[in-house]
Amino acid sequence: MSLLTAILLASTAGGVLSVLLATVALRMKAEWVPVMVSYSIGALLGAAFLEILPHALEHAGSMEALSATVLGGILGFFILEKLVLWRHCHTEHCEAHGADIPQHDHGRSGLMITVGDTVHNFVDGVMIAAAFLVDFNLGVVTAFAIAAHEVPQELGDFLILLHSGYSKTQALLLNLLSSLAMLVGALLGYFLLAQLQWILPYMLAIAASGMIYVAVADLIPGLHKRAELIHTGQQALLIGLGIFTVWLAGTLAHEWMHG
């Protein structure tokens, strides 16, 4: 399998599967949403700290420059989120979109979330390409972490679209179309980043900063709304499971490539 084929398969599968799984998740009980979010937090943090940053450090010319890139990336994602280009909502009523979203707002909320999701998916595609260009194992882990994170996000997007007046079919089509941006980002990332090898570690640093920001700023605060001891233990266990899954995926991918 060529590297380009692997990138295209990973980006396509990640986007489409996350949308399809989110549609299945719509039929689940509301209490299952925090479960998916907790697992996604672990997958994101595990990928960032166990796979992406170590690989970036191996290929970076300056540790200080790489650390500054991570810091700048976190600030950049904060600014993007403030501009409503990057907004993650994981519950039916969330602070990002207001506590009470009108049942019909002429599609304004739905349009906003679709634009944000399209930008997000494009960047995810670039991240996947950058990871595969550095190491196949890293690409597999990164694609897995992105797909795991996409499920609760797509669930939130569906809920916003439905509240904005779209039908379930329209919401599905919009999310599938926005997921194609991941494929576009992966293609551009492959052809552009392949010519600029020196920039790959810093692209990985930006990818890690995005995962850290989403996990810490967007996802974890929502878990604090359920402060009971039993829920806290469940959340910690699922976060640990997400981290373990990333480690296991990385180990299996390494054995598959070098075994």
Image (tube, rainbow, N blue to C red):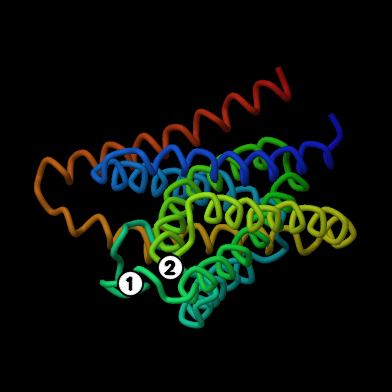
Res 218 → quadrant: bottom left
Residue 83, above or below 5: below
Dot 2 falls on a residue whose secondary structure is loop
What amino acid is found at the position of numbered circle 1 in the picture?
Ile
Quadrant occupied by the N terminus? top right
Please state if 28 lies on the left or on the right of 86 as rendered.
left
Residue 119, above or below 27: below
Quadrant occupied by the C terminus? top right
Percent coordinates x, y for residue 63 in the rendering? 62, 64
Report the residue that reaches farthest toward the top.
259
Percent coordinates x, y for residue 200 in the rendering? 74, 58
What amino acid is found at the position of numbered circle 2 in the picture?
Ser
Reading the image, the residue beneath label 1 is 101
Structural distance between the alpha carbons of marks 1 and 2 = 8 Å
- Mark 1 neighbour density, 10 Å: few (under 14) some (14–19) many (20 or more): some
Observer-nearest residue: 37 or 71? 37
Dot 1 falls on a residue whose secondary structure is loop
Reading the image, the residue beneath label 2 is 164
Image marks 1 and 2: residues in contact by CB distance under 8 Å = yes
